[in-house]
Image (tube, rainbow, N blue to C red):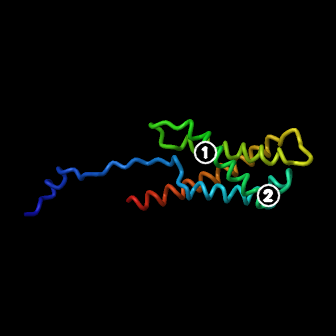
């Protein structure tokens, strides 16, 4: 027996409740952050113009340490009610801050500090990169669950 159009409108379709959270990032996302840090620390960039490049093997160990510390710092601020965007922002800022501290600490001609414009540019670049990586990861996760 077929339902009439009026009967179809009366029955509400059941929609599954889907929660979306981008924190904590997957291991794949964290590995992408480390890879990007290694590239930024060991190749010519805005950062290397001021502080120089770091040899790839040293950049790799520094990048892993930077990411782990930033992840731990951001994870300490997590709350059950959060969708993860604020925590991801904290994570991104921690990565940027620690990366800058790393290059400053090994710079032979240590300057007092980067200018505000340089710091803002570095933070923005890192945040955009981290957010894009997290967004790609989130999109692929949502695509798999749909």
Examine the rendered structure and indicate whether residue 81 appears above or below residue 26: above
Q: Work out how far the residue at label 2 is from the one at label 1, CA to CA, in angstroms.
A: 24 Å
Can you give x and y, in whole percent of width and height, for residue 85 in the image?
A: 53, 44
Question: Residue 27: x and y, percent?
Answer: 55, 55
Q: Nearer the viewer, residue 126 or 58?
A: 58
Identify the secondary structure beneath mark 2.
loop
Q: Quadrant of the C terminus?
A: bottom left
Residue reaching furthest left? 1
Label drawn at residue 71: 1
Q: Is residue 121 left or right of residue 132?
A: right
Where is residue 111 drawn, in percent x and y? 89, 42
- CA neighbours of label 1 inside 10 A, class few (<14), some (14 to 19), many (20+): many
- Name the disc covering residue 45, or none: 2
Residue 117: name its quadrant: top right
For the point 69% across and 48% down, which residue is it? 66
Between discs 2 and 1, the one toward the N terminus: 2
Mark 2 Cα-neighbour bin, 10 Å: few <14, some 14–19, many ≥20: some
Residue 61's image quarter?
bottom right
- The structure residue drawn at horizontal position 87% and vertical position 48%, both measured from the top left corner, is 107
Residue 26 is left or right of residue 142, and the answer is right
Closer to the camera in the image, 58 or 92: 58
Instruction: Determine the residue located farthest toward the bottom in the rendered image.
Output: 1
Q: Is residue 19 left or right of residue 130?
A: left
Q: Quadrant of residue 7?
A: bottom left
Q: Nearer the viewer, residue 62 or 115?
A: 62
Q: Which residue corresponds to the image point at 64% horizontal and 52% vertical from the top-left?
A: 128
Q: How many marks?
A: 2
Helix, strand or loop status at disc 1: helix
């Amino acid at each position: 027996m077929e339902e009439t159009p009026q009967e179809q409108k009366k029955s509400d379709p059941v929609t599954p409740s889907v929660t979306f959270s981008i924190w904590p990032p997957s291991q794949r996302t964290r590995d992408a952050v480390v890879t990007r840090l290694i590239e930024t620390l060991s190749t010519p960039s805005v950062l290397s113009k001021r502080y120089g490049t770091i040899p790839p093997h040293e950049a790799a160990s520094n990048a892993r340490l930077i990411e782990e510390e930033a992840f731990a710092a951001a994870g300490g601020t997590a709350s059950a009610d959060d969708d993860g965007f604020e925590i991801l922002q904290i994570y991104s800022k921690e990565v940027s801050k620690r990366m800058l501290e790393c290059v400053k600490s090994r710079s032979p001609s240590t300057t007092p500090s980067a200018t505000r414009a340089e710091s803002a540019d570095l933070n923005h670049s890192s945040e955009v990169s981290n957010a894009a990586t997290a967004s790609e990861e989130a999109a692929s996760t949502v695509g798999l669950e749909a």
